[in-house]
Image (cartoon, coloured by chain):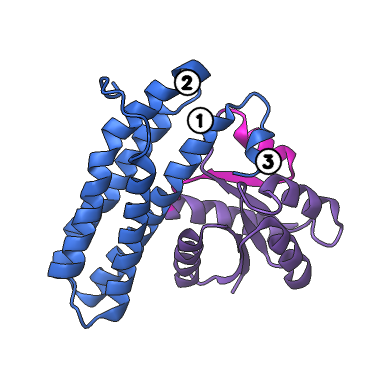
Amino acid sequence: MPTILLVEDNDLNREMLSRRLTRRGFHVLLAADGQEGVNLARSEAPELILMDMSLPIKDGWTAARELKSDPATRGIPILALTAHAMAGDRDQALQAGCDDYDTKPIELDRLLDKINTLLAQRSRA
Amino acid sequence: MQAGGAALPGSRPEVARVRHDLLTPINGIIGYAGILLEDAADLGRTEMLAPLDEIRSGARELADVIRRVLGLHVQPAALEAALSAVRQACLGPARGLVASTCWLMEEVAPPDDAALVRDLEQLAQAARALAALLDPLPDTGGDGPS
């Protein structure tokens, strides 16, 4: 059962997505801000991180940079989640170290495809 | 929104912030409608499927409107008109989502199924949050989005 760390500040959306992922067979860890996400990534070493980018305390771009600069966590794929859909946002997320990018509102099938692709890439690495 | 949004080179932070704020409850509506569709199907509550699907479709349409009207093309000087257009196009449908969800909760869902009722309450909460964000947007009385 792959472990996914979900970093999302909106309570309702965090619970909702956690439940949907749990139903699909994932073990889900939850963080409500970027700093908590970094801390949990370091202590729990999840297989993948779903990172909202607009977060309190430490935003997702900063958290992703920190995790990707730390040898202990740089191998964890980060999938950026954001309501931003502007041209260049994908590049911004990738430049911060995120491995892929998806936009809200989340379409679960599309998100699961991306999660499974990243998990497969990680298992081959 | 945190500094991450403001740090995006070439972005228009105010437009991005409003779009983010509006799409967040829509994400909740779509997600909880998805959960409820799965549960209603599993429980054989087929009378709930069409209304829930309409709620989810309605939320997706609102997301499309918001992305289209509050897109890259919006210049700062045109922001108020764009926000007014979003309000005009979305507030009524958002209130409709609240009403549909409450109707489902009160008239259709089995009152003894606490899990279904709880998730409908979450869905209604997201729809109310969306309407509450739309209501204070400027109302200039102009034409809606094309």
B25, B68: nearer the viewer: B25
Cα distance, mark 1 to mark 3?
A: 14 Å
Q: Colour of chain B?
A: blue
Residue interval drawn in magenta: A87-107
The residue wearing badge 2 is B74
Q: Chain of mark 1?
A: B
Marks 1 and 3 share the same chain: yes
Q: Chain of mark 2?
A: B
Q: Say which mark, if any, is on residue B15.
A: 1
B34, A121: nearer the viewer: B34
B76 vs B123, left or right, is right
Marks 2 and 1 share the same chain: yes
Q: Amino acid at mark 2?
A: Val
Whether pointer 2 and pointer 1 mark residues with C-beta atoms closer than 8 Å, the reply is yes
Q: Secondary structure at mark 3?
A: helix
Q: Where, by quadrant of the figure, is residue A95 drawn?
A: top right
Counting residues from the N terminus, which is met first, the one under dot 2 or under dot 1? 1
- Graded by Cα atoms within 10 Å as few (under 14), some (14 to 19) or many (20 or more), the crowding at tag 1 reads many
Q: Is residue B77 above or below residue B38?
A: above
Q: Is residue B129 above or below residue B62?
A: below
The residue drawn where x is 27% and y is 45% is B94
The residue drawn where x is 28% and y is 40% is B91
Q: Chain of mark 3?
A: B
Residue B46 visible from this viewpoint: no
The residue wearing badge 3 is B3
